[in-house]
Image (cartoon, rainbow, N blue to C red):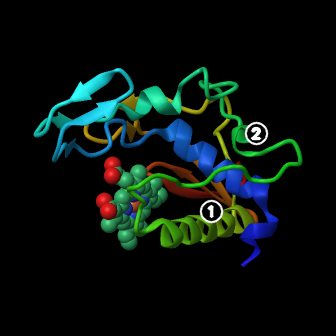
Amino acid sequence: MDRANLPYTDAVIHEVQRIGNIVPLSLPHSTNKNIQLGDYTVPKGVVIIPNLTSVLFDKREWETPYTFNPGHFLNEEGKECFSFTGKRVCLGENLARMEIFLFFTSFMQQFTFSMPAGMKPVLDYCFGITLKQRPYRLLLGFGELYYAGRAGEGHRSTGA
Ligand code: HEM
């Protein structure tokens, strides 16, 4: 697989996931013993709800937290600089990385994506356990054919 040779593509995927912030409160955890966290003592049996938004948009960590910027995941040589670390790792990490890369690159190779004339991308979301994108219109080009619309109400046409 070419992923190792395509650090910018990987960086775009990571940046989409950062700015997408689709599970802002992660999953609840609880402490099974007293924990010292910096200046804080967290007692045993406490439910912890992490605030991932504070991490993903921390202005001390990201150059432009509210602007899409794949450079967040590239070093000076243009190489990827991101890895999962910590005691609790995601068991599906390799599978997820591979699948997302394959889907994303296949879509990019086969289709062109654009906004219908006069429309801007909708970055607003509905709040819930996950952040859900509000409905929006997108033009999906495949050769001369364009598919315009959103789930359930699109139509096919030739030309934008
Ligand atoms: C984009 C895709 C994915 C992302 C961003 C992701 C992210 C994460 C994160 C942040 C955790 C740690 C949660 C925590 O402890 O608070 C986690 C844990 C976990 N993930 Fe994923 N994950 C993804 C896909 C997958 C897939 C495809 C699988 C299974 C096939 C999977 C299986 C697991 C399991 C079993 C854990 C729990 C590990 C443990 O607590 O010991 N994940 N994931």
Q: Quadrant of residue 107?
A: bottom right
Name the quadrant where ligand 1 sits.
bottom left
Is residue 152 in view?
Answer: no
Q: Position of residue 90 (x, y in %)?
A: 41, 61
Residue 103 is situated, as x and y percent measured from the top left of the image, at 58, 68
Q: Is residue 113 above or below residue 121?
A: below
Residue 98, image x and y in percent?
Answer: 58, 71
Seen from the viewer's position, the closer of residues 119 and 71 is 71
Q: Given the image, on which type of amino acid does mark 2 rest? A: Gly
Residue 71 is labelled as 2
| Viewer-nearest of discs 1 and 2 | 2
The circle on residue 95 is none
Tag 2's secondary structure?
helix
Q: Pointer 1: residues within 10 angstroms few (<14), some, or many (20+)?
A: some
Q: Which residue is mark 1?
A: 104
Numbered disc total: 2
> Residue drawn at (68%, 65%), measured in percent from left and top?
105
Instruction: Answer yes or no: is residue 38 visible.
Output: yes
- Of label 1 and label 2, which has the lower sequence position? 2
